[in-house]
Image (spheres, rainbow, N blue to C red):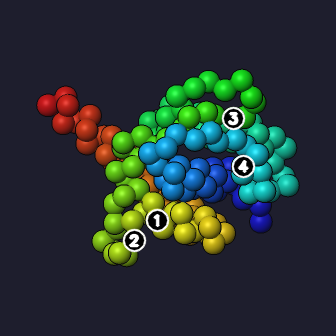
């Protein structure tokens, strides 16, 4: 069965988080070409899917791209935001030992896409919770 867009989004997000987490705090360029082999054949425009994924991550406060690239489907000088770094450095109580970011990096390296998708779901959920908590504290 083909992956849904959400499954593919989680997979590509995990690969992006892994790459940025391993290079943090160094800002790096990310391009759809870095991840092209991860796209299934049924995706007609993987570059657009990649760009839409990164743009959502930027707009949602998970990734920063400091420079506008003149190349299509490329984002320059990217790093994780403080919120994302905090989430990825967290060590889940159920697992112990390795941080969420370390687990994402390991799953990406090992090609464990199901685990990668699961971990990204957890990271995005924790990031949303952190943002909500911050907003609630700020408004009070």
Q: Tell me how far mark 2 sits from mark 3, CA to CA.
A: 31 Å
Q: Please give the count of numbered marks on the rendered protein.
A: 4
Crowd rating for badge 1 (residues with CA inside 10 Å; few <14, some 14–19, many 20+) = some
Residue 108 screen position, x and y as percent: 61, 64
Q: Residue furthest left?
A: 140
Q: Are marks 1 and 2 in contact (CB under 8 Å)?
A: yes
Q: Are marks 4 and 1 in contact (CB under 8 Å)?
A: no
Q: Earlier in the sequence, mark 1 or mark 3?
A: 3
Residue 74 screen position, x and y as percent: 69, 35
* Numbered label attached to residue 98: 2
Q: Tell me how far mark 1 sits from mark 2, CA to CA.
A: 6 Å
Q: Tell me how far mark 1 sits from mark 3, CA to CA.
A: 25 Å
**Numbered disc 3: secondary structure:** strand
* Numbered label attached to residue 34: 4
**Numbered disc 1: secondary structure:** helix
Q: Are marks 4 and 3 in contact (CB under 8 Å)?
A: no
Q: Residue at x 61, y 55 (%)?
A: 15
**Residue indicated by mark 1:** 102
Q: Residue at x 57, y 68 (%)?
A: 107
Q: Tell me how far mark 4 sits from mark 3, CA to CA.
A: 10 Å
* Numbered label attached to residue 41: none
* Numbered label attached to residue 74: 3
Q: Earlier in the sequence, mark 4 or mark 3?
A: 4
Q: Residue at x 57, y 61 (%)?
A: 117
């Amino acid at each position: 069965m083909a992956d849904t867009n959400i499954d593919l989004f989680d997979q590509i997000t995990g690969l992006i988080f892994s790459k940025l987490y391993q290079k943090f705090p160094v800002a790096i360029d990310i391009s759809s070409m870095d991840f092209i082999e991860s796209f299934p054949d049924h995706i007609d425009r993987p570059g657009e899917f990649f760009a839409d994924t990164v743009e959502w991550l930027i707009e949602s406060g998970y990734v920063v791209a400091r420079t506008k690239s003149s190349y299509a489907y490329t984002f320059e000088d990217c790093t994780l935001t403080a919120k994302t770094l905090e989430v990825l450095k967290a060590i889940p109580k159920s697992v112990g030992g390795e941080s969420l970011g370390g687990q994402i990096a390991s799953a990406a390296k090992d090609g464990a896409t199901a685990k990668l998708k699961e971990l990204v779901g957890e990271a995005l959920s924790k990031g949303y919770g952190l943002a909500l908590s911050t907003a609630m504290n700020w408004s009070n």
